[in-house]
Image (cartoon, rainbow, N blue to C red):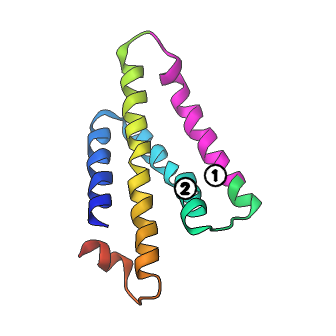
Amino acid sequence: MGFLDSIAGIMQIFAATYLPGSLLVLLVQSAIPISMFLSRVILKEKYHGTQYAAAIIVCCGILLVLSPSLTSSDDGDGAATALWGGVLIASCVPMCLSSIYKEIALGDTDLDPVYLNAW
């Protein structure tokens, strides 16, 4: 748990250095479709169609916001934004894997998740 959380935190710190605050808030939302996908694969979770639609909307929103950075060839800022945006999105993978591990390992335990993360 600690290893996955620390990897996610390190990736997020590096990415946050090079991204504007408005992008940080949006790109971290990629954890929603990533956690749905990983939960489906690892835990065999089932989701309702509206939940899949909402995850697709989140993905479309992220692509819409990042599209100017991906298509601009004027300067290096667009490439840097796309690179660090990708790092921030990728940081959601270990973060979600940590949550899934906690669910598997501590599923039946009566434990406060905030206390667990703080400890």
Q: Which residues are magenta?
A: 53-73
Three-letter amino acid code at the position of disc 2: Ile
Mark 1 near mark 2, Cβ–Cβ under 8 Å? yes
Asked whether, in this view, residue 11 is left or right of residue 92, the answer is: left
Q: Residue at x 32, y 47 (%)?
A: 12
Q: Which image quarter holds the C terminus?
A: bottom left
Q: Which residue is mark 1?
A: 55
Relative side of 73 to 39, left or right: left
Q: Which mark is residue 32?
A: 2
Q: Earlier in the sequence, mark 1 or mark 2?
A: 2
Name the residue at 51% across, 30% down: 66
SS at badge 2: helix
Category of crowding for the residue at label 2, using alpha-carbon neighbours closer than 10 angstroms: few (below 14), some (14–19), many (at least 20): some
Secondary structure mostly taken by the magenta-highlighted segment of the chain: helix
Mark 1 Cα-neighbour bin, 10 Å: few <14, some 14–19, many ≥20: many
**Residue type for callout 1:** Ala
Residue 84 placement (x, y as % from top left):
36, 34
Residue farthest to the top, as pictured: 74
Q: Nearer the viewer, residue 112 or 94?
A: 94
